[in-house]
Amino acid sequence: QVQLVESGGGLVQAGGSLRLSCAASGRTFSRYAMGWFRQAPGKEREFVAAMHWGAGTTYYADSVKGRFTISRDNGKNTVYLQMKSLKPEDTAVYYCAADRDNPYLSISRNEYDYWGQGTQVTVSS
């Protein structure tokens, strides 16, 4: 059974940084694509960033390009989202997701098979 557990959320001032972690277990993830999504109150869940675990390829939403970086630590089976220059509009619950056996990176939440419980990120102005 795949489990994804996010951590690292919190309250930060605008311009600050946070690093989110997603600890993955239950499978070998080398053929998985891993994604980060976020959902603000009253809004749809939106794509933030994705990485293919084996190939290391990455893709970002335009709204976070240049500010966020997705990475992974194979030894710890953990995916990270480093967030810098945070803005109040980055405030949301951030979710980690896994898309099994997919060589491509998808921005559609419907493509992802497993989800974590989410971690709250609040950016104050």
Image (cartoon, grey):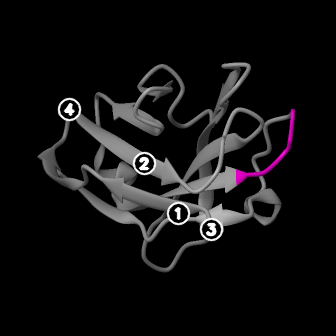
Three-letter amino acid code at the position of disc 4: Gly
Q: Residue placed at 44% from the left, 71% from the top?
A: 117
Q: Which mark is residue 31?
A: none
- Compute the Cα span from label 3 to label 4: 38 Å
Residue type indicated by callout 3: Gln
Residue name at image x 48 percent, y 19 percent: 66
Instruction: State the residue position of label 4.
Output: 15
Image coordinates for residue 14, horizontal then vertical, percent: 19, 40
Give whichever of 79, 63 is nearer the camera. 79
Task: Select label 1 or label 4 by which is in front.
Answer: 1
Q: Does the magenta stretch include residue 71?
A: no
Range of the magenta residues? 99-103
Whether label 3 touches label 4, CB < 8 Å:
no
Residue 58 vs 78, above or below: the answer is: above
Label 3, label 2: how many angstroms apart (C-alpha)? 16 Å
Residue that badge 2 annotates: 22
Tell us which disc is closer to us: 3 or 4: 3
Residue extending furthest bottom? 42
Q: Residue 1 carries which label?
A: 3
Mark 3 or mark 1, which is nearer to you?
3
Element carrying mark 4 = loop
Out of 32 and 35, give the one closest to the viewer: 32
Between discs 2 and 1, the one toward the N terminus: 1
Q: Pointer 3 and pointer 1: residues touching (CB < 8 Å)? A: yes
